[in-house]
Amino acid sequence: GGRLGTPSRFGLPPPEGGRNASTPGAPALHAEGDRPGSPARAPTPARKLYLQAAAGPSPLAPGGRAQPPPNFKVDVAASTIQGSHPGKAANQDKFLIELPQQGGASGGSAVVGVFDGHGELGHRVSAFVTEKLRLELLGTAEEAGVVSGQSLMRKLAGSFERTNRALAASGIDVRHSGTTACTLQMAGDELIVANVGDSRAVIGRLEPGGKQGQLLVRDLSLDHKPDSDAEHRRITRSGGRVQPMHVPGHGFVGPARVWDRSQRFGLATSRAFGDTTHSPANGGQVIAEPDVTIHRLTEHDRYVVLATDGVWDVLSSHEAVAIAAHHGSDIKAATDAIAKEAKRRWELTSPVRDDITAVVMRIDPLSPRRKDESAEPRG
């Protein structure tokens, strides 16, 4: 995984482990390769779950009349395609789909996520973080039916911190390897999205009173790019440096990167698990603290797409949701179509291709929904 840049006209090869990998600031970039023989993860079949909102006082409709708790039918599927560039032997992307049975220990909470590894050991890092966060998120899911989204938000921050500490103690060399993580937890009628890095979650809703099938698309997460306004301020105010790789004789090449104290290694995402060379202790200011957003569902919300930047580098948020909507209730066909279209666009513009992973969730209301919604970004 990781963000792969289209090779410049100077003929530089892509950095080992993807564009997000720690890249030396010199033209001699050598692909050290991934673990040989690691197969791409097979697509998962679509999985379904009926979710019911948390027990408790019914929300009040206008005029003070009590509404019954909302119910949802949720279908989830995923597709992943291994990228292609010199020295690449493994798909470093991972995805997570946990749909416990209603009434089970998880309290009826769905948990999904995408993880984009980068660096020589990115495949091992993304696998470790996927499993560790899975256990952490299922732990918070046990309370999803009885606590508010705000409480879950605080718990998520702790889950990410514990996961990063466990990764540091795992024995995996994470000096120059790491992973992004974009996770979504559905608790009753709330979507709680936690994001580290430049994977992304988006939602599509049918426009009330609009044309048949017209979609409004909204990002549920913030891309953590070194040159985004908020991240650039955070990094530089703490003494870090952000700029593209400098190639003698050619100037600056490629995306903006966060540089370590030695100024030898640059990373193209500003938040990640691992990547200790770029940690605040080493002057890089790359952190694993998630931005958390809470979205209140309405009866018009229909599709959620989570994907790694192998999708978002070549498809817009609206394009991905539109592809999902085109396939209606066949969400496995939707995920396959998003992944295949991303692959096609990479091949039209570049001799290399990033790992591509998309998860699609279709949400159908089973009872009338209230019309208010809220999304609250948290840093």
Image (spheres, rainbow, N blue to C red):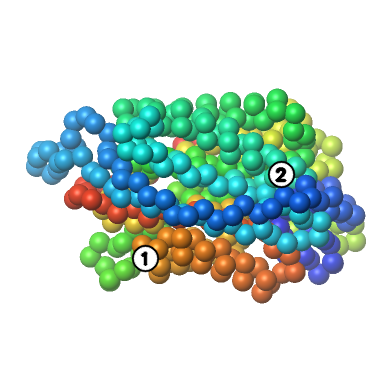
| Amino acid type, callout 2 | Gly
- The residue where tag 2 is placed is 122
Graded by Cα atoms within 10 Å as few (under 14), some (14 to 19) or many (20 or more), the crowding at tag 2 reads many
- The residue where tag 1 is placed is 328
Q: Is residue 241 above or below residue 141?
A: below
Residue at 46% across, 64% down = 334
The image shows residue 17 at horizontal and vertical percentages of 75, 50
Whether residue 219 is visible here, answered yes or no, is: no
On the rendered structure, is 278 left or right of 327? Answer: right
| Amino acid type, callout 1 | Gly
Graded by Cα atoms within 10 Å as few (under 14), some (14 to 19) or many (20 or more), the crowding at tag 1 reads few
Residue at 28% across, 71% down = 211
On the rendered structure, is 303 left or right of 79? Answer: left
Q: Front-most of 36 and 363? A: 36
Residue at 48% across, 45% down = 97
Dividing the picture into quadrants, the one containing residue 300 is bottom left
Q: Residue furthest bottom?
A: 348
Say how many tags the image has. Answer: 2
